[in-house]
Image: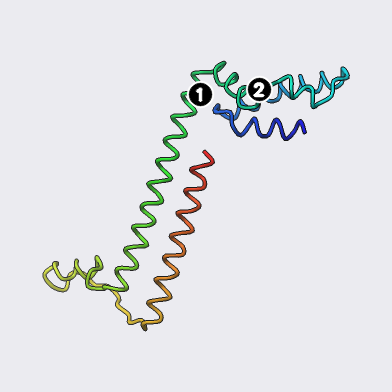
Amino acid sequence: MRKNYLKNLYKIINLNSSTKKRLLSELNNEMEERENAGERIEDIIQSLGDINELAIEFEEAYPEEKIVFQRRKKIINMTLIIIAIIMLLLALHNVVSFVFPQLSIPYIATAYSGGNTLNFIAFKMSNSGILIKIVIEIILSVISFVIVMRNTKKL
């Protein structure tokens, strides 16, 4: 019960991990001492109060670290969102280049280069091959996007 309490508290405190670990280690030691003195763990947890209020108390004790943590969290979130958008755009480009090859970048670059300056390998795929390629690209893009968004929510 104590481990669950501390684990849940660790998840909701908006401070850097070293500060969280130090605070929770001190809290764990205090809880052990009280338990060894004869108090029941349920009473100890009840006396500490609501887990959200305790997290707010810890955050208020270290306001500058909370600000740094929130900035870092925003930067990581924005980076993950940008990566997800880039991955989706790349997948969309692959889909477009197979469905409409005349819109693909190598084709356009060759058409406007004035001749034979750009060379690229072209191959013919069957309609079912194109469809399978598109489905695979979409599935990979969706999986990547979901992973990025899930990690963003955890931060």
In the depicted structure, whether residue 34 falls above or below residue 70: above
Q: Position of residue 62 (x, y in %)?
A: 54, 18
In the depicted structure, whether residue 101 falls above or below residue 44: below
Image quadrant holding the N terminus, namely top right
Q: Position of residue 128 (x, y in %)?
A: 40, 81
What residue sits right under mark 1 in the picture? 66
Left or right, residue 51 beside residue 147: right
**Picture residue at 46% right of the left edge, 32% below the top:** 72
Contact, mark 2 vs mark 1 (Cβ under 8 Å): no
Amino acid type of the residue tagged 1 in the rendering = Lys
In the depicted structure, whether residue 81 falls above or below residue 58: below
**Picture residue at 84% right of the left edge, 22% below the top:** 35
Tag 1, which secondary structure?
A: helix
Q: Label 2 neighbourhood size at 10 Å, few (<14), some (14-19), many (20+)?
A: some
Left or right, residue 104 beside residue 84: left
What residue sits right under mark 2 in the picture? 23
Amino acid type of the residue tagged 2 in the rendering = Leu
Q: Which mark is residue 146?
A: none
Mark 2–mark 1 distance (CA, rounded to whole Å)? 14 Å
**Picture residue at 54% right of the left edge, 41% below the top:** 154
Q: Residue at the left extreme?
A: 114
